[in-house]
Image (cartoon, helix red, strand yellow):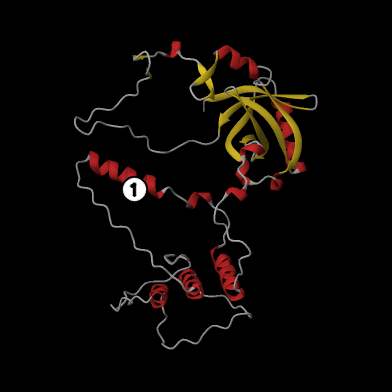
Amino acid sequence: MHTVWKGAISFGLVHVPVKMFSATEDKDISMKYVHKRCGSPLSYVRKCPVCEEEVGWDEINKGYEYEKGKFVLFEKEELEQLSEQNNKNITILDFVDLTEIDPIYFQKTYYLSPDQAGANAYRLLLEAMRQSGKIGIAKIAIRSKSSMAAIRVIEECLAIETIFYPDEIRPVSQVPNLPENAVVNDKELTMARMLIDQLSSPFEPGKYTDDYRERLLDMISSKVAGEEVKIAPARQETNVVDLMAALQASIEAVKPIPTDPGITPKPRKTTRKTTAKEAVAKVSGEAPDTAAPKPKRRTAKAKKTDTIS
């Protein structure tokens, strides 16, 4: 892995030399803008609209627009001096519980490894944090940008996650159309909680995949091979109005309803089990598919196609 940053963690008078490595990677498929007529990739040109000429990097400064069309300019050295005191040190300010930090604050994760002769101090900090169950809140400057950060233990490694400053988090009060004093139906709430229980399981990140990226890679392979690409039409979602029926259909689609003393199942009028699709169609007023269903083996991972709108 490529070293992103070198410096040291300091807490109290303890100094831990570390190297920083990115813990995540962006797997988005990169594409270029191409001229449709001739198939040539387009290039971006830094051009001054006043001088009407291309501008090289050696002729560019950073500037802040304090009024419309008016800028104050900064040399590269001036900006570097602002972060010079902190850009090689991670200063732990406090130790807190991880549960006290809302996930909205987290930005990007990096791994930290001991540098030079810092293995003993590194291991000491790691083990002390593991036993205390605490994480460290620190300040760090990466690429001239100052940031807050959270230092925590991941397996046998120290990790640091940059986090937003409080004034960078927009308040919820700015979100429009949030319901106020909404009344929730008790029976619907009970069914919704049952559905959550049915869908609850331990977090296993390996079972989640980027379906869009996989489909795009398949399409790229097909186009490279000169094959004709056909895209299936999007599935039409059913506008379900009756929440109780939608919840019932969703639970049936996942697994058998567990015994609950607070809910008495309705007696079924037929010996054949009503499918989730038929229940939704009944509520929405659509005619259900009367074709004889193909026998399917139902499992705990039955297809979850019914949604609540």
Residue 177, above or below 86: below
Element marked by disc 1: helix
Determine the image quadrant of residue 139.
top right
Residue 179, above or below 97: below
Given the current orientation, which residue lies at the most extreme right position? 13
Q: Position of residue 143 (x, y in %)?
A: 57, 23
How many numbered discs sit on the rendered protein?
1
Residue closest to the eye, 300 or 49: 49
Residue closest to the eye, 224 or 86: 86
Q: Position of residue 86 (x, y in %)?
A: 68, 21
Q: Residue at x 58, y 83 (%)?
A: 264
Q: Which residue is mark 1?
A: 215
Given the current orientation, which residue lies at the most extreme front position? 68
Determine the image quadrant of residue 298.
bottom left
Would residue 228 be found to the left or right of residue 177 on screen?
A: left
Q: Residue at x 58, y 61 (%)?
A: 179
Residue 23, above or below 258: above
The kind of residue tagged 1 is Arg
Q: Position of residue 229 (x, y in %)?
A: 23, 48
Q: Position of residue 7 (x, y in %)?
A: 65, 21
Q: Residue at x 43, y 88 (%)?
A: 269
Would residue 251 be found to the left or right of residue 289 on screen?
A: right
Determine the image quadrant of residue 222.
top left
Residue closest to the eye, 309 or 259: 309
Would residue 270 be found to the left or right of residue 116 on screen?
A: left
Q: Residues within 10 Å of mark 1 (few under 14, many from 20)?
A: few
